[in-house]
Amino acid sequence: MIRASGIGKRFGRTNALDGVSFSVEAGELVGFLGPNGAGKTTTLRILSGFLAGDRGKAEVAGFDLATARQEACAQIGYMPERAPLYDDMKVQEFLRFRGRLKGLSRAEAAGRVEVLVARLELAEVSTRLIERLSRGFRQRVALADALIADPQVLLLDEPTSGLDPLQRRSFRTLLKDLSKDRSVLFSSHVLPEVEALASRFLVLSRGKLVGDGDLATLRAVAGLPLDADIESVFAALVNGDER
């Protein structure tokens, strides 16, 4: 569902991505890890079609983002870390508007909003102005926006940022459910949370992929014992790349 082959990106003299390659299949929930500035957001922006890579190839649902961007983007739900929401619109109004922008008919948009309001537990705020929502509800609205066109691929950048423990727990349950029939790639700095959610991890450091696999595989790559926790594995992979 997601294919990244040798993706590279420079910003001036900064080499943000240096030949990154990986894939995410349908039904996979993959955690995307790396320190600040590692290139995670740049990768997600390229895969979402918001940013073009300088080299390499990115494919989503079999469509090349360079040659079939419109078809690829129709299969993508992207939730940036600071998702742009229209504070002066009501939740249902905003989601119907976003559905129409993504090519749904008026009836299709209304139907999807009804489904998502129920699935994401937004009923109590569905007629409320977005500016009056708590952080947790705003995150749910942003996720509903990403899901409005029923995409095959979800790209989520720090989706639980700013949530309290109960909200995080609820969000994790929701993501697991959503990944059953989609490819989900999500970034997070909360390593135990990623461990609880993901079956596989991608680790970036200074624009390079330094780890790809389940926790047992990453322990072996890092040369750590079988009982090493994810924070130790992450530190070993990232610090090893910096030496």
Image (cartoon, rainbow, N blue to C red):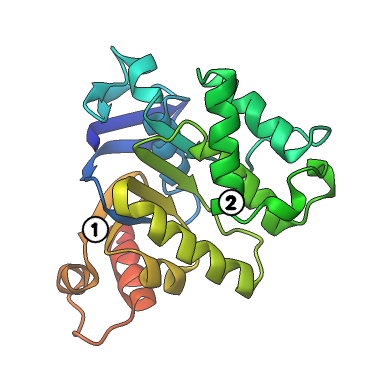
Please say if 49 is above or below 234: above
Quadrant location of the N terminus in the rendered image: top left
**Mark 1 packing: few (<14 Cα in 10 Å), some, or many (20+)?**
many
The percent coordinates of residue 212 (x first, y second) are 22, 56
Q: Give the alpha-carbon distance from disc 2 to disc 1, as whole Å.
A: 38 Å
- Residue at image location 26% in from the left, 28% down from the top: 59
Please say if 142 is above or below 221: above
- Residue at image location 42% in from the left, 46% down from the top: 40
Mark 2, mark 1: which one is toward the viewer? 2
Q: Which mark is residue 118?
A: 2
Give the left or right position of residue 158, taking residue 3 as reference.
Answer: right
Q: Which mark is residue 211?
A: 1
* 155 vs 152, nearest the viewer: 152
Where on the picture, by quarter, is residue 214?
A: bottom left
Residue 33: in sight, yes or no?
A: no
| Residue type, mark 1 in image | Gly
- Residue at image location 42% in from the left, 49% down from the top: 38
- Residue at image location 40% in from the left, 24% down from the top: 73
Quadrant location of the C terminus in the rendered image: bottom left
